[in-house]
Amino acid sequence: MIKNLLLFVLLTLSALAASAQTAEPAVPAAAQAVPLDPVAATRAWIDTLPAAQRAKTDAYFEGGYWIRLWSALIGVGSAWLLLASGLSRKLREGAERLTTRRALRVLLYALGFLLALTLLGLPWQVYTEYFREHQYGLSNQGFGDWAGESLIGLGLTLLLGAPALLGIYAVIDAAPRTWWLWGAAVTIAFAAFGSLIYPPFIAPLFNDYKPVSNPEVRDEVLSLARAHGVPADEVYEFNASKQHSRISANVAGLGGTMRIALNDNLLNRSSRGEIRMVMAHEIGHYVLNHAWKGLVFVGLIFLAMFAFARRAFAWAHARWGARWGVRDVADPAGLPILVAAFTVFQLLATPVNNTLTRTQEIEADQFGLAVGREPDAEAAVILKLGEYRKMEPGPIEEFVFYTHPSGWRRIENAMRWKAEQQRAGAR
């Protein structure tokens, strides 16, 4: 949960997906009609997906709804186990025996707590991130490679999570009445810091980055970036194919650490037109200031989350604090209560969080169409995303669970744009 909070901004800035050096996509007849019927064209594009593939994708994506719920329940259950077993109290007491310095006590407890929480959730992590991905044919990794990356992730959780918790408890000590306000501020600062260091320091721990080898792709992307004020003088590619076959690209980072990167699946599986559409979309995120707007939104979410946690802690401590050996909110042994509250809040806030990112993705799609002007390439990209995203959800399903617009909605948007261009050209 702590790792998820620190990387939340990164998740809200993560990329769409797209194209490479294959032939331009075959356009269905209904999508070539003049005048164009956007609904019929959308139906024609989606019907190019094999029924078996769609059924498999739907099962995978719908299963993710339950994964989200069970992950939250396991997180809350793990926090309860640490409290009820007395392990949280023992971790605090062990830290108190080792040092008299408050900061070191908190840091030692945080390291032990994060490690314990990771170990308790490890079986679930192995299932959801390794076995289930292989079950649906969405992973290229052997178990050893996956385990190695998971260890790197654990190291990052300890390296970033422990100082973040130290900062939170420092503000609790300094402002016991308004700690939840300052705790949210500390969390926002660490989230921004994570976004800042991600491109140059974190991403290379998992993939190899190098300048794009195809000079035509490089020049085209840089030209598009320069035309819209993106301060980039290089375009990178990274070897995501060692992990999976999904296509993606991103304009990641904040300020001076911003970097344009395309994964090798995108370069190898998609056409030049699809690449242009993907990069136009990603540059749209930059031009529309989605990173900074997202940071403001995340800040408001964190503020509400800490306010919720403040009340939840007071309620739980009044009932079970003595039994668990938790003294007060400044006691690190009470951290599992806060983490459980954070987990519950984030689960309940799923529709709100998803609506933010989905709205930004819609805006970036519109920008991408206006700049890239290749709606059929856009449709072809969205079909590739249909390998792991359900294409036609119900409206409530899309509102609650989708971080991006559904495949149907995105293709229909592209086809409506195309129809409007036809009408404009006929005038």
Image (cartoon, helix red, strand yellow):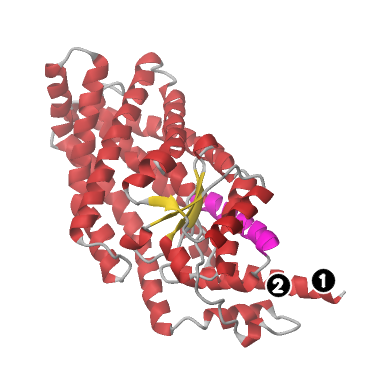
Please name whichever residue, 358 or 291, is drawn nearer the observer in this view of the structure.
291
Place of residue 404 in the rendered image (x, y in percent of width and height, measured from the top left): 52, 59
Magenta residue check for 356: yes
Q: Residue at x 26, y 29 (%)?
A: 334
Is residue 316 at all visible to an observer of this figure?
no
Residue segment shown in magenta: 353-372
Magenta residue check for 223: no
Up-down relation of residue 250 to residue 254 (above or below): below
Q: Amino acid at mark 2?
A: Lys
Q: Quadrant of the N terminus?
A: top left
Place of residue 311 in the rendered image (x, y in percent of width and height, measured from the top left): 39, 31
Q: Which residue is mark 1?
A: 424
Q: Earlier in the sequence, mark 1 or mark 2?
A: 2
Label 1 crowd (10 A; few <14 / some 14-19 / many >=20) = few
Q: Which residue is mark 2?
A: 418
Do residues under tags 1 and 2 come within 8 Å of each other at their CB atoms?
no
Q: Quadrant of the C terminus?
A: bottom right
Label 2 SS? helix
Calculate the distance from the C-alpha at mark 1 to the C-alpha at mark 2.
Answer: 10 Å
Label 2 crowd (10 A; few <14 / some 14-19 / many >=20) = many
> Horizontally, is 315 left or right of 80 in the view?
right
Up-down relation of residue 268 to residue 50 (above or below): above
Label 1 SS? helix
> Horizontally, is 211 left or right of 149 in the view?
right
Place of residue 36 in the rendered image (x, y in percent of width and height, measured from the top left): 72, 80
